[in-house]
Amino acid sequence: MENGFIWRDAAVTYADWEGTAQLDQRLTGPGIEETVGLNRDEWMVIGIDIGGGELEHDLRVIAVHRDRIPDGGGVLPRIAEANEGEIPATEFLIHDVDPYAVLQAITHVFELRMRLSGASGLPIRVIEQSDVPEQA
């Protein structure tokens, strides 16, 4: 790839739903690198992308090669500073996995919140809670 592309926020043609997600990665067990089959000594995963269509979803990870990672803390801002404000990375399409099984394998706590786009920016107050099917 000559100039590559800027990795962007999620976007679909007709966004009926929009939202946010946050993940607290599990510290007891293999990290994302090992889980997807990358060598942790060579790669540092900095992005996870699950997407697709009605029939299938793919998992892609964005990773920085360890040769680009300086010693010490705060490495990502320092990598960007050394590269005109951008973090040079590699996108890997991960084959032969269930993206959601990988997500679950690396998760300590995960939260995904989606709302109809018509409710964007409007507070939603939950005034009741129930179960489906109803529980005794």
Image (tube, grey):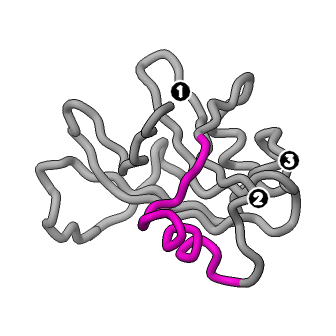
State the quadrant of the C terminus.
Answer: bottom right
- Read off the residue under disc 3: 39
Circles 2 and 1 in contact, beta carbons < 8 Å = no
Position of residue 109 in the picture relative to residue 124 (left or right): right
Q: Earlier in the sequence, mark 1 or mark 3?
A: 3
- Read off the residue under disc 1: 57
Span of residues in magenta: 73-90
Position of residue 121 in the picture relative to residue 115 (left or right): left
At x 77%, y 40%, the residue is: 36
At x 19%, y 32%, the residue is: 14
Q: Nearer the viewer, residue 2 or 64?
A: 2
- Residue 37 is situated, as x and y percent measured from the top left of the image, at 82, 39
| Measured Cα–Cα span from mark 1 to mark 3 | 24 Å
What's the amino acid at mark 1?
His
Position of residue 89 in the picture relative to residue 8 (left or right): right
Q: Please tell me whether residue 133 is drawn above or below residue 81 in the rendered image.
A: above
At x 66%, y 47%, the residue is: 103
